[in-house]
Amino acid sequence: MLGTSWTEIVALIAAFVISVVATPAGISGAVLLLPFQVSVLGTPSPAVTPTNLLYNVVATPGAIYSYRRQGQTGGQLTGLLVAGTLPGVILGAIIRVELLPGAQVFDLLVGAVLTPLAVWIALSRPEARSVPHGHKIPQPVLVVLSGAVGCVGGIYGIGGGSILAPILIASGRPPSEVAPAALASTFVTSVAGVITFMILSVHQHAHVAPDWLTGIALGAGGLAGAYTGARIQSRLPDLLLRRVLGILAVAIGIRYLLLGVSVA
């Protein structure tokens, strides 16, 4: 664990570096930042979850604004995702505080969420497009699916876009619609998650509220990193980035799985 005076500086630099590398590969830095918080920054549990959500609150508005300037809002899809993820993240936050406050169970959860996402990152190709004759997920099913993803996001500390985006694209929706919708859903979900954790912290003795300084530092680094990564995207080998990031994330996920199943 780092000394207090260094935590915010390291958080900002780490978020910037992770976002610079992750953004050109189309990956959210939040997925990798949570393990970094636990292992390097020493953010206490369960405060690490809302702190990671705070990263999304600070880091995503720039990209959302950029999409809106290009006329990409996600349309009806945005509303459908928010309708599911919003109640889902509130439920996930309650589960995190009331049922999963311990570090060992959370380690297992981190590994269970991160490992399959990492495999997808490593195996997917950046030039993949929507399936021309794919079968779009029916709206009621999509809302329920978004609710489940929002719940996972509330427990883990991610907005859910990293999980929903590949599913939606594979079902036949164009990336130009999915990306802004998933990002907007992530922002709204993260705001709701942070507020929920703040309310839950009133009657809790453990570290439940977000670490504001760390979360803002992470978000500021992520905001600058995402902008930089988008600018240099054309000069980086996307496929190689995905492979390297995916393999690294798989290794981190397996490590947390092993920690979760080990005897305390």
Image (cartoon, helix red, strand yellow):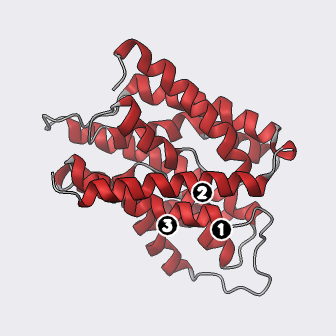
Residue at image coords 42%, 61%: 113
* Element on which disc 1 rests: helix
Report the front residue among 33 and 97.
33
**Residue tagged 1:** 123
* Element on which disc 3 rests: helix
Residue at image coords 50%, 58%: 250
* Label pair 1/2, CB-CB below 8 angstroms: yes
Looking at the image, residue 104 sits to the left or right of residue 148; the answer is: left
Mark 3 closeness class: few <14, some 14–19, many ≥20 residues within 10 Å = some
Q: Which of marks 3 and 2 is nearer the N terminus?
A: 3
Mark 2 closeness class: few <14, some 14–19, many ≥20 residues within 10 Å = many
Number of numbered callouts drawn: 3
Which quarter of the picture shows residue 89? bottom left
CA–CA distance between discs 1 and 2? Answer: 8 Å
**Residue tagged 2:** 246
Which quarter of the picture shows residue 132? bottom right
Q: Earlier in the sequence, mark 3 or mark 1?
A: 3
Residue 231 higher or lower than 116, as above or below:
above
Looking at the image, residue 116 sits to the left or right of residue 207; the answer is: right
